[in-house]
Image: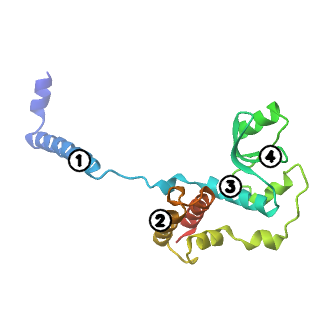
Amino acid sequence: MPANVVESIPPSVLAGLVLGGLFSVFAAGLFLVGERLFPSRQPAETAYSSDARRRAEIRTYLERIGERYVEDAEVAGQRVAFYLPTRDVAVTFDAQAYFRIGNATGTYAILVEHEMPGHHLGGRLPFDVPELERELRDARDPVAVAYEALGLPATADQAQVRAAYRDRVKDVHPDHGGDEASFRRIQEAYVTAKEHAK
C-alpha cells in the first residue's frame, strides 16, 4: 500500500522534496564547517552585569563615609558582597544569604535590592553615618565617572568605548602589573559606559 502512495505523488513534487532535503543537508553541513573554521567567540566583557555597577556605588558610598570594608567575604558560611569588620555588618545581594546570616549569627545583615542606589545603604546601617550633602551624592554621575575612567568624552559610541576598555585594561590588569581594585573599576566603567553609549 505505501508503494501505491509514493506512485500517486507527481514526479515534480518528489523531485522537489528530494532537492529540498539535499539542500537542507548541504546548508547544515555548511554551518557546521563554518562553526569549526570560525568559532563564535563570546567576549569576556559581556560577563559583567549591573551587579558591578551596584558594587561600585556601594564601594563609593562606604569610602565616602570612611567605613572600612572587605569585598566578597565569607560570613557564617555565606559569601557576601561587603563585610564591615569593625561593625560586624554583612551586605549581600542574595536573599538566602541574608536570612541565613541573620538567623545563624549575631552579625547584622543587610539585603540590597537590585534597584537600590548605593547611597541608600546609609539608611539601613545599624549605626550613625555622616550625612553626605545631596550635591556631593549627585555630583558624581556614574555615567560621567565611567567615561572619565575610560578617558572618553560622554559622546563616545560603543566602538570607542570597547577600544578604550581594551587599551585601559592592558594597563591595569593584575597580570601586567596593575592591581585588582583598578582592574575592577575599569570593568565596571566599561559596563556602565557600554550601556549608555549611543
- Seen in the picture, residue 16 relative to 55 is either above or below; the reply is above
The residue beneath circle 4 is 85
- Dot placed on the residue nearer the N-terminal end, 2 or 4: 4
- Seen in the picture, residue 152 relative to 25 is either above or below; the reply is below
Residue farthest top in this picture: 1
Left or right: 168 as drawn, with respect to 40: right
Using a 10 Å C-alpha cutoff, classify the residue at mark 1 as few (fewer than 14 neighbours), some (14 to 19) or many (20 or more): few
The residue beneath circle 1 is 33
How far separated are the C-alphas under marks 1 and 4? 55 Å
Q: Which mark is residue 166?
A: 2
Residue 149: give x, y in percent of width and height.
Answer: 60, 70
In front: mark 2 or mark 4? Answer: 4
Left or right: 90 as drawn, with respect to 7: right
Using a 10 Å C-alpha cutoff, classify the residue at mark 4 as few (fewer than 14 neighbours), some (14 to 19) or many (20 or more): some
The residue beneath circle 3 is 55
State the residue at coordinates (72%, 37%): 97
How far separated are the C-alphas under marks 4 and 3? 17 Å
- Dot placed on the residue nearer the N-terminal end, 4 or 3: 3
State the residue at coordinates (72%, 58%): 59
Residue 96: give x, y in percent of width and height.
Answer: 71, 36
CB within 8 Å, label 4 to label 3: no
